[in-house]
Amino acid sequence: MTQRFTGRTALVTGAGSGIGRATALAFAAEGAHVVVAGRRREPLDETVTLIEESGGKALAVTADVTRAADLRDLVDATVDHFGSLDVAVNNAGVLEAGGQPAADIPEDAWRRMLDINVTGVLLALQAEVRQMRTQPGGGAIVNIASRIGVHGRIPGMTAYGTTKAAVSVLTRGAALDHIADGVRINAVSPGASATTMSFKPGETEADRAERMRTAVPVGRVSTVEEIAAAVLYLASDDAASVVGTDLVVDGGSTA
Ligand SMILES: NC(=O)c1ccc[n+]([C@@H]2O[C@H](COP(=O)([O-])OP(=O)(O)OC[C@H]3O[C@@H](n4cnc5c(N)ncnc54)[C@H](OP(=O)(O)O)[C@@H]3O)[C@@H](O)[C@H]2O)c1
């Protein structure tokens, strides 16, 4: 196994489940010290246990990405514990009001999604850049957007798609704003991936597999490890000249 992150510290938000947990495990497997963040303590502790059982080092910190103070404390805890913040993955996100046509999207769900998916990414990025630009090696940030923000074409996903398109644009703008600070910022846009988020209400795993067989050119959801691999590439020195890109990993859905 290549060890691209030995001696570096990676922070992952939303790391108690799904893509975030897989990304945290992948960083640890490549030598990083990992800080895992989210609102609920128990799933974060489970991620830490999985990392420690594989011989890695990790720290769980509860933080709500809609609160700037939580994010400042999160970055401070990272630096206090491991000495630096070299990589940050802004992965925390929610999907609400799926299936609702635009005219029927509840205002509170719309505002909550903007708050978590967009403002949460900006506030996290602000806390991360403030630390990274003080470090000799700078840092790398990867935001998690979505292929739904790249190509709408999914009825009933207007609210979620709007937030994810915003993450993609935020990524490009911030990347240009901060590359001179030594901070490289990119995004990954997953397509339907193997987490609870990609189930339709009431759907079983077999139902989802059948839906994906025709809906996605590769005929299946992406694994969380496939998404994590794209994140690690962008965060690594292999991507040293990749700045402000949005890497779509969607089994061909937007091709
Ligand atoms: N799965 C897919 O098909 C897919 C496709 C495209 C993009 N994505 C994106 O990938 C990311 C990960 O999604 P996933 O599929 O892995 O879903 P998931 O398992 O539901 O993970 C989302 C994580 O975000 C955390 N979170 C939510 N609100 C938060 C907040 N306010 N502050 C801090 N943490 C918060 C959750 O933990 P707590 O509830 O404990 O805070 C949870 O661990 C999301 O940004 C999602 O939009 C997913």
Image (spheres, grey):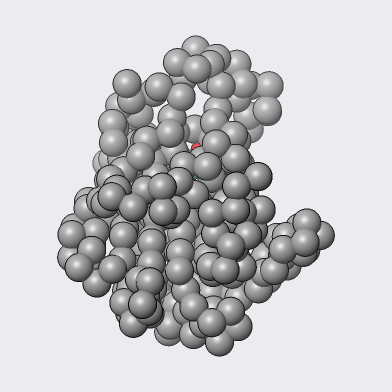
The image quarter containing residue 47 is: bottom right
Q: Does residue 36 appear in this view?
A: no
The residue at 29%/48% (across/down) is 242
- Image coordinates of residue 143 in percent, x first then y, are 38, 55
In this picture, is 84 found above or below 233? below
**Viewed as shown, does residue 214 lie left or right of 47?**
left
Q: Residue furthest right?
A: 53
**Viewed as shown, does residue 190 lie left or right of 4?**
left
- Image coordinates of residue 33 in percent, x first then y, are 61, 68
**Where, quadrant-wise, is the C terminus in this rendering?**
top left
Q: Does residue 151 appear in this view?
A: yes
- Image coordinates of residue 247 in percent, x first then y, are 35, 39
The residue at 38%/71% (across/down) is 137
The residue at 45%/46% (across/down) is 233
**Viewed as shown, does residue 40 lie left or right of 198?**
right
The image quarter containing residue 109 is: bottom left
The image quarter containing residue 226 is: top right
Taking depth in this image into account, of 28 and 38 the one nearest to the observer is: 28
In this picture, is 178 found above or below 193? below
Q: How many badges with numbers are in the image?
A: 0
Q: Residue furthest top?
A: 214
- Image coordinates of residue 140 in percent, x first then y, are 38, 61
**Where, quadrant-wise, is the N terminus in this rendering?**
top right
The residue at 46%/19% (across/down) is 216
